Amino acid sequence: MTVSRQRALLLGSTALLAALTLLAWSQPWFTLELAATAGDPVPLVVRGDVAAAALVPLALTLLAVVAAVALAGPVFRVVFGVLEALLGACIVAVSVVALGGPVAASASAVTEVTGISGADSVNALVTAVSVSAWPAVAIALGGLVVVVGVLLAVVAPRWPVSGRRYSRTRAVAVDEPTTDPIAEWDALSGGDDPTAPSR
C-alpha cells in the first residue's frame, strides 16, 4: 500500500468513526418502563444524548485530530495517534458505564418527565429496562478508534513532511531584474530611454 493510500485510509477511518459515534449518540439507547399510579407502566425512550452525553465532545475531538495530523510533523503525529487511542478508550468507558447502569444514566430524563429525583426514588419508579443495540455499537466504535490510533502512532511518522505550501516564506527568483521607478524617471528626463536594452 502506498503512503498516500495509507494516510487516506487512516485519516478517513478516523473521520468515519467519529461520524458513526455521533450517529450512535443520537439514537435510542434504553426504554424504561415507569410505574404509573393507575394502569400500565409508561414507556420512556432515552437516547444517547442523555445516557452518554460525553460522546459528542469525544467525537468532535476525533475530527480535530484528523485535521491536526494532516498538518503535523512526524513527532506530533505520534502524539496525536496516542491521543486518538485515548479518545477511543474514553468512548468505550462512557458507553460501558451507561450500559452497566441504564437507570442511573437515564435519571435526568426520568426526573424531567416525572419531577422525581434521587437515585433511590428513580430506581423505585423504573419497573423494567430494555436496551437497544446502540450502546454495544458505541463500544465497538470506541475499540476501532483505539486500533486506528495505535496504527496512526506507529506508521504516521514515516509519512513525508507536508510541502512548502504552508510555509510563510516566499521564493524570489535571483535573476529577476530589479527596477527603480525614480531612476527610470530621471533617465527619461535626461533623454535616455530606460526601456531600451542595455548595450
Image (cartoon, rainbow, N blue to C red):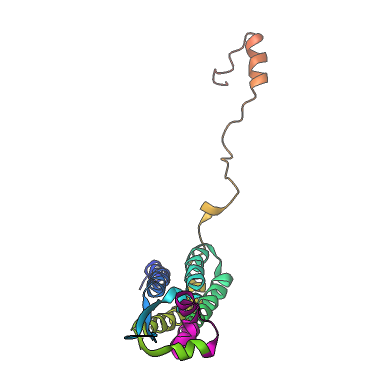
The percent coordinates of residue 79 (x first, y second) are 57, 74
Residue at far front of view: 38
Say above or below: 159 vs 170: below
Residue 41 in sight in this render: yes
Q: What residue sits 55% from the left and 76% below the top?
A: 83
Main secondary structure along the magenta-highlighted residues: helix
The percent coordinates of residue 161 (x first, y second) are 52, 64
The percent coordinates of residue 176 (x first, y second) are 56, 34
Residue 114 shown in magenta: yes
Q: What residue sits 58% from the left and 45% below the top?
A: 170
Residue 75 shown in magenta: no
> In the drawing, does residue 176 fall left or right of residue 123?
right
The percent coordinates of residue 78 (x first, y second) are 55, 75
Q: Residue 49 is drawn in which quadrant?
A: bottom left
> In the drawing, does residue 198 fall left or right of residue 12?
right
In the image shown, does 59 or 185 lie closer to the viewer?
59
Say above or below: 99 vs 12: below
Q: What residue sits 46% from the left and 75% below the top?
A: 50
The segment highlighted magenta reads 92-120
Q: Residue 140 is drawn in which quadrant?
A: bottom left
> In the drawing, does residue 141 fall left or right of residue 185?
left
